[in-house]
């Protein structure tokens, strides 16, 4: 099975294609009530690189993604997308940056009153107004074919399985040809076969689109398959940020425990 | 989040046993309530400002607005017409009985016309729309909120205040006066019909007598004040829906609050609007 390492060998090498990181968060803090969820997180992702963010439930992995796309505001710290600081931007200005980002929600968050095709067409309708109806329809069919959902065009989200919903969510996230892809638990709640299919799909999309990706997951196997680099969070801090081998050789007790239990 | 030291009944509980040990003075409870009230109105103010800003700046969501005009207007029409028709019959029956007692039967057409157009038509339309549309908007947006669909709209680089709230509120504002005219027309028609069944009265005679000496000032302000009802219904329903938390229970609460608060504020606003109209359009 091809992993992100194999693919990276034949693609742009993120280590060589450094420059400014596509996504860079620095000293990020976020508190809900009296609970500090993120306590000074610093991470960065380059073009064509996939970072998997791992950690126990409730360690702020999803919050980190929501902060990066601007659905939450940080208490302090910096979030830079392609060099532009997004903390404090208003909805319309942050919208311009979001057009470069695709987001797959944990439960797909498909619009339940729209069909599968309409869900994928939704961002195109609003941001590619110059597209004719037939061009839009072709693009939707292409995106659905890319995620293996070409047979479900007219189905409602409630009529398809969780795994299929994630595929459609992924197609929607890719509609505007994003440069950054954020995936929140792409394999959570799926059976091992569907998880494997989603992993391979994500790898295929990375290979074809060369995006910077951040994948939040607690599935170490999935992270190992799709990511170039892994960051492990605990108690709001990054315990380790490196390759899977770095994690394996770490002497940190939490890292060892996490690897042994996974 | 509930303060762990306090029970919902307002007593300080022992952190270990949960037994009441001391009564909280009612003034503290009142202070909490006042604080919550200020917080609610403050949040509503911020929400209104966000919606206003989004509504007046491009891109405009015409397609969504047309969908909402249909949702609020066309789909409410049968219900509003039925309610208006029923009110016409009720006023007709009551007015005939009361006016007969005072020997003022000739005042029947004017009584019906003024009662329906100035008082009952607008308020009944507002309450029916608050029930149907307010609950619908509140529940729909709340459901979208708890299933992250509103977040998905934001993640798609769209402003949910513009796409979801501004369009729905504007649709309510534009449609309420039109629905009121429909309710008024149905009320007058059924009111006349109920009277005509008892004693002969031509429709022409009824209209001529009912509107005799009436000016636009008598009928236009009461009809168009319903645009304010629309604003209240739409704003409160969108606000309640988009701030929902807590799954299915939260959705139910948002739908209920949208109707209850929408109807309550609508009636309270009517008190102010009636006085305003009496002063400005004597």
Image (tube, coloured by chain):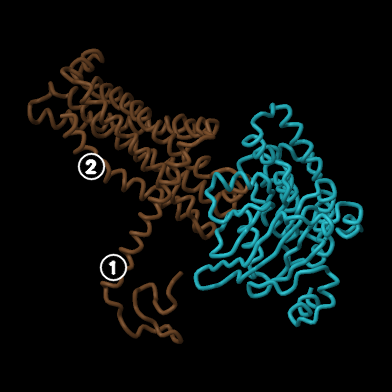
Chain colours: A cyan, B brown
Circle 2 crowding by C-alpha within 10 Å: few under 14, some 14–19, many from 20: few
Quadrant hosting residue B269? top left
Going from N to C along the chain, the mark reached first, 1 or 2, is 1
Residue reaching furthest left? B103
Could you tell me which secondary element the residue under label 1 belongs to? helix
Circle 1 crowding by C-alpha within 10 Å: few under 14, some 14–19, many from 20: few
Residue A61 x %, y %: 66, 65
Residue A209 x %, y %: 80, 46
Could you tell me which secondary element the residue under label 2 belongs to? helix
The residue positioned 32% from the left and 32% from the top of the image is B86
Give the residue number, with chain letter if any, for mark 1: B30
Residue A48 x %, y %: 80, 53
Relative vertical location of residue B32 with respect to residue B199 in this rendering, above or below: below
Give the residue number, with chain letter if any, for mark 2: B272
Quadrant into which the C terminus of chain B falls: top left
| Pointer 1 chain | B
How far apart are labels 1 and 2 at the CA level? 27 Å
Instruction: Count the marks.
Output: 2
Residue sitting nearer the eye, A130 or A14: A14
Relative vertical location of residue B266 with respect to residue A203 in this rendering, above or below: above
Does residue A81 appear to the left or right of B106 in the view shown?
Answer: right
Residue A208 x %, y %: 84, 46
Residue sitting nearer the eye, A199 or B189: A199
């Amino acid at each position: 099975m091809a992993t992100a390492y194999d693919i990276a060998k034949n693609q742009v090498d993120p280590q060589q294609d450094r420059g400014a990181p596509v996504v860079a968060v620095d000293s990020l803090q976020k508190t809900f009530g009296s609970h500090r969820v993120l306590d000074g997180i610093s991470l960065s992702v380059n073009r064509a690189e996939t970072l998997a963010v791992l950690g126990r439930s409730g360690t702020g992995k999803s919050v980190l993604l929501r902060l990066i796309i601007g659905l939450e505001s940080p208490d302090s710290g910096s979030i830079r997308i392609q060099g532009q600081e997004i903390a404090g931007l208003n909805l319309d200005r942050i919208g311009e940056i979001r057009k470069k980002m695709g987001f797959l929600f944990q439960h797909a968050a498909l619009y339940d009153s729209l069909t599968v095709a309409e869900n994928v067409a939704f961002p195109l309708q609003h941001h590619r107004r110059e597209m004719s109806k037939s061009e839009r329809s072709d693009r939707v069919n292409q995106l659905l074919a890319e995620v293996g959902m070409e047979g479900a065009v007219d189905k409602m989200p409630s009529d398809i399985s969780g795994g299929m919903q994630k595929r459609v969510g992924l197609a929607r996230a890719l509609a505007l040809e994003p440069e950054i892809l954020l995936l929140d638990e792409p394999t959570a709640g799926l059976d091992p076969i569907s998880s494997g299919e989603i992993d391979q799909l994500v790898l295929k999309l990375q290979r074809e689109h060369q995006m910077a990706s951040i994948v939040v997951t607690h599935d170490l196997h999935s992270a190992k398959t799709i990511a170039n680099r892994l960051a492990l969070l605990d108690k709001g801090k990054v315990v380790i940020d490196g390759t899977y081998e770095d994690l394996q050789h770490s002497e940190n007790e939490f890292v060892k425990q996490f690897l042994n239990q996974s | 989040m509930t303060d762990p030291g306090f029970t919902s009944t307002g007593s300080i509980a022992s952190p270990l046993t949960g037994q009441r040990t001391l009564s909280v003075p009612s003034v503290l409870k009142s202070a909490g309530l006042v604080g919550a009230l200020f917080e609610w109105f403050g949040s509503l103010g911020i929400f209104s400002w966000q919606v206003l800003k989004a509504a007046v700046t491009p891109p405009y969501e015409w397609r969504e607005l047309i969908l909402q005009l249909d949702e609020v207007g066309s789909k409410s029409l049968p219900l509003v017409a039925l309610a208006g028709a029923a009110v016409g019959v009720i006023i007709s029956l009551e007015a005939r009985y009361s006016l007969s007692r005072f020997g003022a039967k000739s005042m029947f057409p004017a009584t019906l016309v003024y009662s329906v157009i100035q008082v009952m038509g607008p308020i009944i339309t507002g309450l029916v729309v608050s029930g149907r549309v307010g609950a619908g908007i509140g529940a729909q947006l709340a459901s979208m909120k708890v299933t992250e669909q509103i977040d998905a709209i934001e993640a798609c680089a769209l402003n949910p205040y513009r796409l979801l709230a501004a369009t729905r509120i504007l649709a309510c504002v534009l449609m309420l006066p039109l629905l009121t005219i429909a309710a008024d027309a149905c009320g007058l028609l059924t009111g006349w019909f109920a009277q005509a069944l008892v004693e002969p009265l031509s429709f022409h005679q009824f209209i001529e007598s009912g509107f005799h000496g009436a000016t636009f000032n008598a009928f236009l302000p009461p009809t168009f004040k319903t645009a304010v009802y629309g604003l209240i219904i739409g704003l409160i329903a969108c606000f309640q829906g988009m701030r929902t938390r807590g799954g299915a229970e939260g959705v139910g609460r948002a739908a209920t609050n949208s109707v209850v608060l929408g109807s309550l504020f609508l009636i309270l606003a009517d008190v102010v609007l009636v006085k305003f109209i009496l002063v400005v359009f004597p």
